[in-house]
Amino acid sequence: MRAAAEAESIPGIGPAPEVHARLTGVTRLFDSLHALGPIDLDLRRGEFFSVVGPSGCGKSTLLDVVAGLGQPSAGEIRFEGRPVTGNVPDGVGVVFQEDASFPWLTVWDNIAFGLRRTGLRGPELKARVGAAVDFMGLADFATAYPNQLSGGMRQRVCIARTLVLRPRLILLDEPFGALDQQTRLLMGDELLRLWRETGATVLLITHALDEAAMLSDRIGVMSARPGRFIEVVETGWARDRTSEIATGPAFGQVTARLWEKLRGESMKSLAGSGIITA
């Protein structure tokens, strides 16, 4: 049973959006390196939230602690009202940038892999994998192996392997980072369709400002290390948006605002690495 977080009431407005995941004072240290935080964030149920920030600011570290793949040094993370305590919670799916498909398995068997580990067999397994294969447009490649697919199609396989587990919170760590610009835009359309049709909450880590602007309801802009949120930008897009919004003036305004906030932090990060002079 889901333990839903209670929505607070805002005077004169009504109920606030339901909190699906909450980070409170989250900090991450690696020995003497202060990598992240403190971070406070409420992810609203069903929203698409992206995180951008300079290289090395702790974006992927943030995703790891939300996923339960790493423990915060201080603070607390709750998903559906329950604390995240060191394992990926039930209902959370993770997709990484690296191609995580198994080269010795076909597309169908790659997607079925996680379900088989849960013990699912028989007609339900076939139905759920078949639905994921169809949903991601992979029906004509179900018997192909990863080395027979393009990079974008292999990433679809990885997304489908996560989707088939029916996660309520999907965590994406730069899943399209290795793809060219045109393919990333098209994959973004697929991701928006997945988000709408599943109703899942999505947290995306990305270095691409245009990708964040196109996909997101809200975008968290992080500072140079130790990463913390310096602003959360609301895009105001309709839920049925597609990559066509990238042709409008409002899109340019969102990306310009992101860069305005991020430029100084990126320079700090490069100066700290000795790449440029502050």
Image: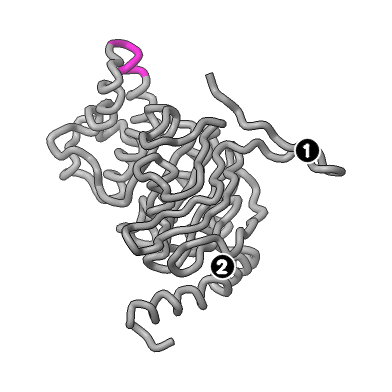
Secondary structure, mark 2, is: helix
State which mark lies toward you, 1 or 2.
Answer: 1
Residue numbers of the magenta segment: 122-127
- Residue placed most toward the observer, 7 or 153: 7
Q: Quadrant of residue 13?
A: top right
Looking at the rendered structure, the kind of residue marked 1 is Ser
Residue ID for mark 1? 9
Q: Quadrant of residue 252?
A: bottom right
| Image position of 164 with respect to 228: above or below | above
Residue 99 drawn at (x, y percent): 25, 47
Residue located at (65% from left, 48% from top): 238
Looking at the rendered structure, the kind of residue marked 2 is Leu
| Image position of 262 with respect to 140: above or below | below
Which numbered dot is residue 258? Answer: 2
Q: Quadrant of residue 3?
A: top right
Judge from the rendering whether residue 31 lies leftward or rightward of residue 28; answer left or right.
left
Residue at far bottom of view: 277
Judge from the rendering whether residue 162 lies leftward or rightward of residue 22; answer left or right.
left
Residue 250 drawn at (x, y percent): 65, 64
